[in-house]
Amino acid sequence: REQKPSGARCECCGLGFSGPKQLAEHEGGKRHAAAAALAALPVAPPLLVECRQAEMSEPSLRAAFGPFGEVRQVTLLGPPGGDGAPGGKERPWRATVQFSQSSAAARALGPTALYVTGDADGVKRRVYVSAD
């Protein structure tokens, strides 16, 4: 059964909470602080996206991040320490996602769990997002 937030909402992160106490706890956290700093920037920096289970594609990343706002650019980086080409067997696979607006980047950074659907198998895989 899906829970519906009762109205306490962080507009910066785009997250809903069950009450004002949970919202206050969220607003005191590191992830909210990072999202608020992103939202205040005049230009959205690229977000680093990491998937530890399978390689990612540009269309799957655009589909996963599109609900947060207009995605300006996706760059596939491949595994760290590799030659930068996606498709290697090393993990994790990395990419950057850049939004047209910094408020969209803040909303994408807000949730603790994001999922990208694989092109080949349709399986949703968790990705980790940071503003590094």
Image: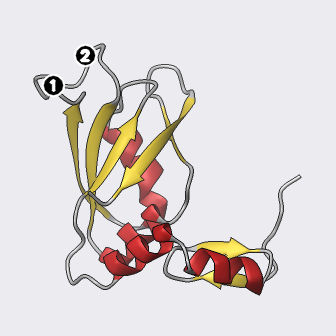
The quarter of the image holding the C terminus is: bottom left
Disc 2 secondary structure class: loop
Estimate the x, y position of residue 28 in percent, counting from the top left: 56, 79
Q: Which residue is mark 1?
A: 85
Q: Amino acid at mark 1?
A: Ala
Of residue 71 and residue 49, the one placed in the foreground of this image is: 49
In this view, the residue farthest toward the right is 1
- Position above or below: 131 against 8: above
Is 82 displayed left or right of 41 in the figure?
A: left
Q: Which residue is pictured at 31% across the width and 60% down the height?
A: 131
Q: Which residue is at a point 42% across and 24% down the rendered structure image? A: 54
- Residue 103, label in figure: none
Crowd band around label 1 with a 10 angstrom C-alpha radius: few (<14), some (14–19), many (20+): few
Work out whether 2 lies above or below 35.
Answer: above
The answer for how far apart the CA atoms under marks 1 and 2 are is: 7 Å
Q: Which residue is mark 2?
A: 88
**Side (left or right) of 44 relative to 39:** left
Name the spot of residue 29 as percent of width and height, x first.
54, 72
Seen as rendered, the residue at the extreme left is 83
Query: For the point 37% across and 49% down, which residue is it?
Result: 62
Left or right: residue 23 versus residue 79 is right
Q: Could you say where residue 76 lies in the image, as x and y percent from the top left?
A: 22, 37
Determine crowd level at label 2: few under 14, some 14-19, many 20+ residues with C-alpha closer than 10 A: some
Give the answer, above or below, for where 101 lies relative to 70. below
Q: Amino acid at mark 2?
A: Gly
At horizontal 44% and vertical 45% (from top left) the residue drawn is 128
Q: How many marks?
A: 2
Contact? badges 1 and 2 (CB < 8 Å)? yes
Colouring rule applied to residues:
secondary structure
Q: Position of residue 18 (x, y in %)?
A: 80, 75
